Image (cartoon, rainbow, N blue to C red):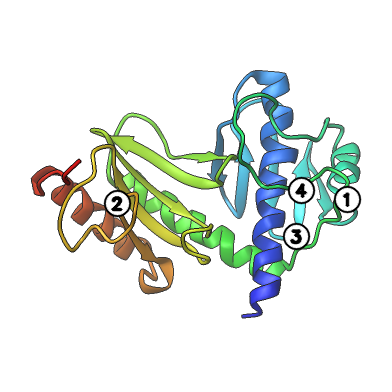
Amino acid sequence: MDSTSSTRTRRALHGLGELVLAGPQYRRSGTIRLRVAPDGIATVQDPGLRIEADALVAGGHRLPLTGTFAELGERAGVDVGAPAGLYEDGSGVDPKDEIAIDSGEAARFLECFARGDEALRRLGGDDPPVLWPEHFDLAITLDEVNYGVSLGDGYLAEPYAYVGPWQPRRGPFWNAPFGAARPLAGLPDPDDVAAFFRDGRDRARHDAPASP
């Protein structure tokens, strides 16, 4: 795997999710929530858009991921841009940036979200997993514990699963500043990811809170 290509592709996917899916959806339907869809990620409300490894699917049309983010949005008939005034972080992508994406790397990243989505749904809960455009992580919250999958960030520059209790816990399981994290490279299928989440749920219930 080319780390430069991987980093560029992850950033491009984040930009597509934030600027092309979440921003237009927020301006039209008032929500930034995204979801995992077959072969990609998608909006949950109008406009109906889906990002796959090599295309934006809009209105039955497959638009190649070429040109700038703004040009792609124009071809799809949506106003590209991040949701305004909701958060300070984000992808760092400008609508005028060129879309630099490797379809093979993109497919690998999207499979990570698919693996995480299946594992998160096995935990139960009333609400489906949400892909948030700010940090570009797929997550649910149950009993004041966050469970999710990130494609990589400043903490760990590769896809990983995490468990984050609102109140930190003590013990060797909790190896990250926000709780516990495991690279998805070591969790190769949904069963493995689900087992990590279940372990985190049990430990969150029984491990002592960390000292203030």
Q: How far apart in space, not on screen, are marks 2 and 1 (Cα)? A: 37 Å
Residue under the point 40% across and 51% down: 118
Give the residue pinned by disc 3: 54
Q: Is residue 179 above or below residue 28?
A: below
Image-quadrant location for residue 168:
top left
Disc 2 to disc 4: CB gap under 8 Å: no
Residue picked out by circle 1? 68
Amino acid carrying mark 2 in the image: Gly
1 or 4: tag closer to the N-terminus:
4
Q: Nearer the viewer, mark 2 or mark 4?
A: 2
Mark 1 near mark 4, Cβ–Cβ under 8 Å?
A: no
Residue 30 locus on image (x, y percent): 63, 19
Q: Is residue 133 left or right of residue 59?
A: left
Going from the N terminus, do you reach mark 1 or mark 3 first? 3
Q: CA distance from mark 3 to mark 2?
A: 34 Å
Q: Residue at x 43, y 49 (%)?
A: 117
Instruction: Tell me the crowding category of disc 1: few under 14, some 14 to 19, or many 20 or more residues within 10 angstroms, Cα based.
Output: some
Q: Which one is closest to the eye, mark 2 or mark 1?
A: 2
Q: Secondary structure at mark 3?
A: loop
User: Where is residue 3 shown, x and y percent of the image?
Assistant: 64, 76
Q: Which residue is mark 2?
A: 179
Label 2 vs 1, first from the N-terminus: 1
Name the residue that disc number 4 marks: 56
> Where in the figure is residue 33, as x and y percent of width and height?
56, 32
Q: Outermost residue toward the front?
A: 212
